[in-house]
Amino acid sequence: MCMTKKELESKVQEFRSLKAMKEELENELKAVEYSIISYMTENGIDTEITDTAKITYKPQSRTTLDKEKLADILGDDLKPFEKISFFNVLRVK
């Protein structure tokens, strides 16, 4: 695919325009997500069912290994190297 500098500049402008639209959409998505989360927390619920969706907002955890500590102390018992993180997850099905 060979293009001229003028065509390249046009693509760059298109890219910038699309990137700006993407950022605007991401901001709108975050605002809508925040309003859904606010509804869930204000009503003290973790699950809501509407005509078109099942919405959950529940705590979730993740356990990871600290690779630096594991590399320093190679042992069979990995419990001392676990990190557990807790966070909420919004799902709309």
Image (cartoon, rainbow, N blue to C red):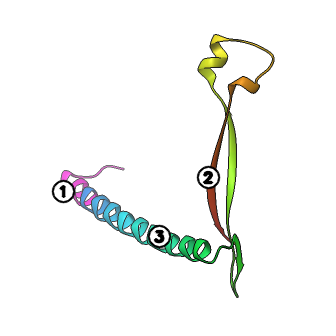
Q: Which residue is mark 2?
A: 87
Earlier sequence position, callout 3 versus callout 1: 1
Label 2 Cα neighbours within 10 Å, binned few <14 / some 14-19 / many ≥20: few
* Residue range corresponding to the magenta coloring: 1-11
**Residue visible at 63% across and 78% down?**
43
Is label 3 in contact with label 1 (beta carbons under 8 Å)?
no
Circle nearer the viewer, 1 or 2: 2
Residue pointed to by mark 1: 6
User: Which amino acid, mark 2?
Assistant: Phe
Residues at discs 1 and 2 in contact (Cβ within 8 Å)? no
Pick out the residue farthest to the right: 76
Q: CA distance from mark 1 to mark 2?
A: 48 Å
The local crowd at label 1, few if under 14, some if 14 to 19, many if 20 or more residues have their Cα within 10 Å, is few
Which residue is painted at 31% across and 64% down in the image?
20
Give the Cα distance between marks 3 and 1.
34 Å
Residue at the outermost bottom position: 51
Q: Quadrant of residue 66?
A: top right
Residue 68 x/y as whole percent: 59, 19
Asked whether 60 falls inside the magenta stretch, the response is no
Q: Which residue is mark 3?
A: 29
Decide: is 22 above or below 52.
above
Residue at left 49%, top 74%? 32
SS assignment at label 2:
strand
Tell me the crowding category of disc 3: few under 14, some 14 to 19, or many 20 or more residues within 10 angstroms, Cα based: few
Residue at 67% x, 18% y is 70
Q: Amino acid at mark 1?
A: Lys
- Side (left or right) of 6 relative to 11: left
Q: Position of residue 74 (x, y in %)?
A: 72, 12
